């Protein structure tokens, strides 16, 4: 045991599993510092011995584990962009700590640190997911404890997604016509008419289009359910694509099936072999010119909402949008007030009609009743005559 002072505060220093541990006790009392050092040793020993056959991993820093994790992740996933982003934040904040030194409190500290940086709760939750996967079996234990305490995930505010009205859609398209961007107008038309994600639109190839049968096939997608799905082209989308193809052929000579519909680069140096990297700048300019609030992704919400309002079934919506569950469809479709009001109005009219129908049909029902009563009286008279005549005949 080695205790020493820095100013008025006691520190401890010792070696554990080949690593030098030097930390402040934050105590001015030597006896309290001794207890803190003993507790710290016990925590490290318990963490080191909690999982068999992986002791060498327990003394690695999180930063070292992260490098190996991302290498393996890249072999199993098509895109590593978000993983690198999320793990990068984890390493920045906790990368110098040993795996054995991380526990539930470390996760809470990470959540607090990211929230102070104004990170969105949804992003923090996803980053914590990567953090726990980096820790392996230890992460599983921590996850279960946090679940039990109900502190694993931060509460996510309700979605601010919206569905654009017809007027807003027209305003966006008109504003896009007046921009110099060769991409944004077609992108908005496709997004509104197909519900495709921005990344799916950016990665469209000319070979993904079938003009003869009027549909497209989604290539690269965020989800496995999204890839390979086919979406019919409405006339507006097909005409916009045909116009864009004329511009493309005039610019590059041909519309090669392997080339991207939205080439990257500046206007004088476009490269059709690579896709445009983002549509955010063009969208931001169009949205401001149109005086419309919302995100480009809300065009997807709009498409799915319109499908739901048209009476399309969940399976049809999932096939078109590339979702994997009815719950996801429910999260995306936001039935608008006009449709809700129309539905309530139809119920009211049906009920009103049911109540007023007897009054309207009463005269007809009275005539029918008189007719039935007359027929019954006629039958009764005929039956009485036959019963009186029968005994006479038998007597004869």
Image (cartoon, helix red, strand yellow):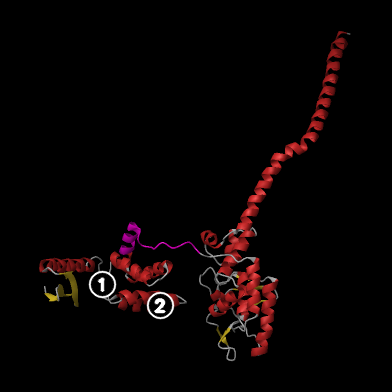
Region of the chain picked out in magenta, as a range: 141-159
Q: Position of residue 238 (x, y in %)?
A: 68, 75
Q: Nearer the viewer, mark 1 or mark 2?
A: 2
Q: Residue at x 77, y 34 (%)?
A: 362
* Residue 84 - label: 2
Q: Observer-nearest residue: 144 or 111?
A: 111
Q: Which residue is mark 1?
A: 58
| Corner quadrant of residue 200 | bottom right
* Residue 45 - label: none
Q: Observer-nearest residue: 162 or 60?
A: 162
| Corner quadrant of residue 243 | bottom right
Q: CA distance from mark 1 to mark 2?
A: 22 Å
In the picture as drawn, the residue positioned furthest to the top comes out as 395
Q: Residue at x 63, y 50 (%)?
A: 344
Q: Position of residue 112 (x, y in %)?
A: 34, 68
Q: Is residue 16 left or right of residue 308?
A: left
User: Is disc 2 surrounded by few (<14), some (14 to 19) or many (20+) residues within 10 Å?
Assistant: some
Q: Dot 2 lies on which element?
A: helix
Q: Position of residue 347 (x, y in %)?
A: 65, 48
Q: Is residue 18 left or right of residue 130?
A: left
Q: Position of residue 326 (x, y in %)?
A: 54, 59
């Amino acid at each position: 045991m080695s205790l020493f002072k820095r100013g008025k505060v006691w520190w401890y220093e010792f070696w554990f599993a080949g690593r030098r541990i030097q930390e402040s006790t934050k105590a001015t009392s030597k006896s309290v510092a001794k207890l803190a050092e003993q507790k710290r040793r016990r925590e490290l020993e318990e963490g080191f011995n909690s999982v068999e056959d992986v002791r060498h991993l327990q003394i690695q820093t999180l930063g070292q584990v992260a490098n190996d994790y991302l290498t393996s992740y890249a072999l199993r996933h098509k895109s590593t962009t978000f993983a690198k982003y999320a793990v990068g934040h984890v390493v920045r904040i906790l990368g110098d700590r040993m795996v054995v030194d991380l526990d539930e409190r470390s996760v809470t500290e990470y959540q607090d640190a990211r929230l102070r940086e104004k990170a969105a709760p949804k992003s923090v939750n996803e980053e914590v997911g990567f953090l726990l996967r980096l820790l392996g079996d230890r992460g599983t234990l921590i996850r279960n404890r946090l679940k039990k305490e109900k502190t694993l995930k931060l509460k996510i505010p309700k979605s601010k997604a919206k569905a654009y009205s017809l007027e807003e859609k027209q305003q966006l398209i008109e504003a896009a016509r007046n921009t110099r961007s060769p991409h944004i107008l077609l992108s908005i038309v496709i997004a509104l008419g197909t519900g495709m994600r921005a990344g799916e639109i950016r990665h469209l190839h000319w070979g993904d289009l079938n003009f003869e049968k009027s549909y497209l096939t989604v290539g690269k997608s965020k989800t496995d359910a999204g890839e390979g799905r086919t979406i019919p082209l409405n006339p507006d989308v097909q005409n916009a694509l045909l116009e864009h193809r004329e511009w493309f052929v005039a610019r590059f000579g041909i519309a090669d099936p392997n080339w991207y519909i939205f080439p990257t680069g500046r206007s004088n140096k476009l490269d059709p072999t690579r896709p445009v990297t983002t549509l955010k700048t063009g969208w931001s300019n169009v949205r401001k010119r149109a005086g419309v609030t919302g995100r480009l992704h809300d065009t997807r919400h709009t498409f799915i909402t319109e499908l739901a309002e048209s009476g399309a079934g969940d399976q049809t919506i999932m096939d078109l949008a590339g979702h994997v569950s009815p719950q996801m469809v429910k999260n995306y479709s936001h039935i608008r007030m006009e449709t809700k009001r129309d539905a309530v109005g139809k119920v009211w009219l049906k009920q009103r009609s049911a109540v007023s129908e007897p009054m309207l049909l009463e005269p007809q029902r009275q005539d029918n009743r008189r007719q039935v009563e007359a027929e019954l009286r006629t039958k009764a008279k005929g039956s009485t005559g036959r019963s009186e005549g029968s005994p006479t005949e038998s007597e004869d």
